[in-house]
Image (cartoon, helix red, strand yellow):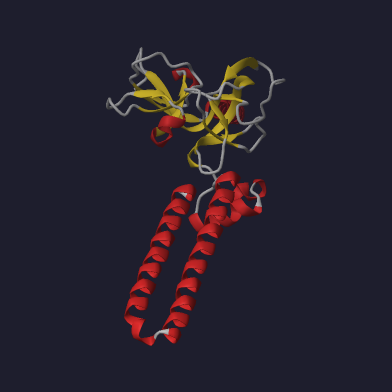
Amino acid sequence: MIAIIINNMRKQRHLRLFVAGIITVIAVVDLSTASASSANISHSYHSSSSIVNGSIVGLDQKKSDYVVAASTKDGKRLLGVAVASDDSLLAVDATEGLVQVATSGNVSTLVSTLNGNIKVGDQIAVSPFTGIGMKSNPGAHIIGLAKTSFDDKSDGATTREVTDKDGKKTKVSVGYVSLTIAVGTGNIAASDANLNSLQKLARSLTGRTISTIRVVVALIVALIGLATLVTLIYAAIYGSIISVGRNPLAKYAIFRTLGSVLAMAALAGIITSTVIFFLLR
């Protein structure tokens, strides 16, 4: 009798261990699935206008604790991506009517092909279109890294024709990519392959990327300025030596003239340097 009771107790213990193991496995699987699909932390913010989920947002400069759909104009105040509260693993103060902004994790984000097709691993930056990202330029304010690619053939892509400030019309596709949030500044070093030798030279001197046209104009101005300085200084010194040799009594007047010419050369150098500075700033 005692043996039968002990045997039943052992069976019940094994059954409890088996059930506990099943529950643990299910819990781990559910948690992993939730983390993969909505691994982000979001916070609630106010907004003066409606913000679509997936929009890139930044802090409102005029109102505390408010957000706006971000663009290149306010990239310095970049915060995160607007999401639904039930898409967050942890939604802080998920109050009705407030905008939930994910500041970390993986989110579905609105992007466009304004700056070219997006590939996996590309940095996504703010664009001229409010709330919509694009492939990053060097030094741009970025929201994160693309985990999926996007072009005009991607699922859900919508193509529109837009007109820039110069009147040029361009077809742009808009849609969503999966993105890992990492707010910061675009990696300048990663774009060296896209720069020509003149741009690399200018960036080594100034620390920023400058268009080729401005670099060429700056070089032309520098060459003209250098030629002007060399001509003025050489002509002034050579002429003064010749004049003093012919008429030693007039050396003071000659030296005054030499000083005036050298002052003009210095002024020309200052003007040239100022023009180059504004071209390369």
Front residue of this view, candidates 156 and 135: 135
| 40, above or below 160, in the image | below
Coordinates of residue 133 in the picture (x, y in percent): 54, 28
Coordinates of residue 54 in the picture (x, y in percent): 51, 21
Question: Is any atom of residue 36 visible in this view?
Answer: no
Coordinates of residue 259 in the picture (x, y in percent): 35, 72
| 234, above or below 74, in the image | below
Front residue of this view, candidates 55 and 73: 73
Quarter of the figure with residue 274? bottom left
What residue appears at the point 51 percent right and 50 percent down from the top-left corner? 208
User: How many marks do you count on the picture?
Assistant: 0
| 150, above or below 216, in the image | above
Coordinates of residue 187 in the picture (x, y in percent): 55, 46
Please state, as top left, top right, bottom left or bottom right, where the N terminus lies in the image.
Answer: top right
What residue appears at the point 38 percent right and 61 percent down from the top-left corner? 267
What residue appears at the point 47 percent right and 76 percent down from the top-left corner? 239
Which residue appears farthest toward the right when viewing the image? 153
Front residue of this view, candidates 264 and 138: 264
Q: For this view, does 185 lie left or right of residue 169?
A: left
